[in-house]
Every structure is written in structure tokens, then in C-alpha cells.
Amino acid sequence: MTFSGHFIFSISIIIIIKKINLFNNLSKINLIKLIIICILSSSLPDLDHPNSIIGKKFYYISKLFYKFFGHRGFTHSILSIIIFYYILNLLIFFNLYIPKYIIYSLIIGYTSHIIGDMFTYNGVPLLWPCKWKFTIFIFKKKKNKEKKFCFIFFLISIFLYFLKI
Ligand SMILES: [Zn+2]
């Protein structure tokens, strides 16, 4: 999925999660605030690709990740979500208290990226270090299809959000 695809997809996911009240921690937090935090981590898994937008910003870290794990390896797995969650929680030990809603939104943004990549032909190694690739649907490298999908999904999430149920 492209950077803009992940961007829109993460917004749609957080809108739906907020609407269905999946996590109590998020229920009283302003949606715009959640969206902004969610976007911040929505491209983080692509840190394993030195030519990605985030990879270019953190080039040396990105090269290191690429060298050890390759693109769409560890950073696109369930294990990486768990480790990211624990790193965010560990910051408490360094007196860097992060409110739960920020941690949850960052995890949602990160996870939305992995789900988004599952819609692509190559899929993601969810169970890394096992190399099985998981894919839900195939875009076959047609970026227009991906854009349409993300846009329609975004419209659906907005519709659901304002639906009075
Ligand atoms: Zn990716």
C-alpha cells in the first residue's frame, strides 16, 4: 500500500474503532486528536524500507532494519506490534508517562498499516519469523484500485460515524 493509502486507511480504522467503542480508553478523547496520533504511527512499519518516506527521514535506522529483516519482514508482524506496545509502556520507567489513549492510538495506527499491506498482492509475514505471507485481497499493483478502495472505505467510516446507532 502507498503512503497516502496507509494515511487514509489509518484514519478510517480509528474512526470505526472510536464509533464501535472498542476501547474504553478512547471513548472520551476527541476524535481529531486520536486521528492525528494514529497517523503518526501509520507509516512506522515501513521503517524497514530506506526508500519509503519514513525510511528517508530515519535513513540509518532504516538501513539497519532493512539489512537485518528486509522489507516487509519483522516490522510487519504481530510480534512487532507486541514489542512496539511494550516499548511504549516501558517509557513509563524512564518517567516518560504516556497516556493510555496515546499508546492505543499509536498501536492502532501501526496495526492499520499491517492490515493495509495485507490487501496487497505480496501480503505480510504476520507470524514472523515464520515466512508465511498473509493476504486478504489482491490489488495486483494497480494503485488506482488501492486508492478507490481506501477512499470508499473512508467514506463508509464517515457514514458509520455519523449514523445514529
Ligand atoms: Zn508496509
Image: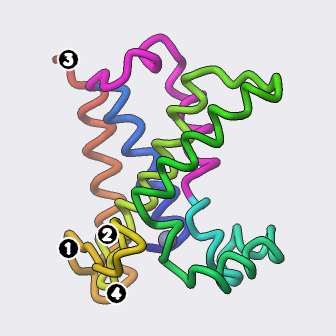
Mark 3 to mark 1 CA distance (whole Å): 30 Å
Q: Which residue is mark 2?
A: 118
Q: Does label 3 or label 2 sit earlier along the sequence?
A: 2
Q: Which residue is mark 3?
A: 164
Q: Does label 2 or label 4 sit earlier along the sequence?
A: 2
Magenta stretch secondary structure, dominant? helix
Mark 1 to mark 4 CA distance (whole Å): 13 Å
Q: Does label 1 or label 2 sit earlier along the sequence?
A: 2
- Pick the front one: 30 or 24: 24
Amino acid beneath label 4: Lys
- Tag on residue 142? 4
The residue under the point 77% across, 76% down is 56
Q: Which residue is mark 1?
A: 137
Of marks 3 and 1, the one in the foreground: 1
Residue 27 horizontal/vertical position (percent): 42, 15
Amino acid beneath label 2: Met
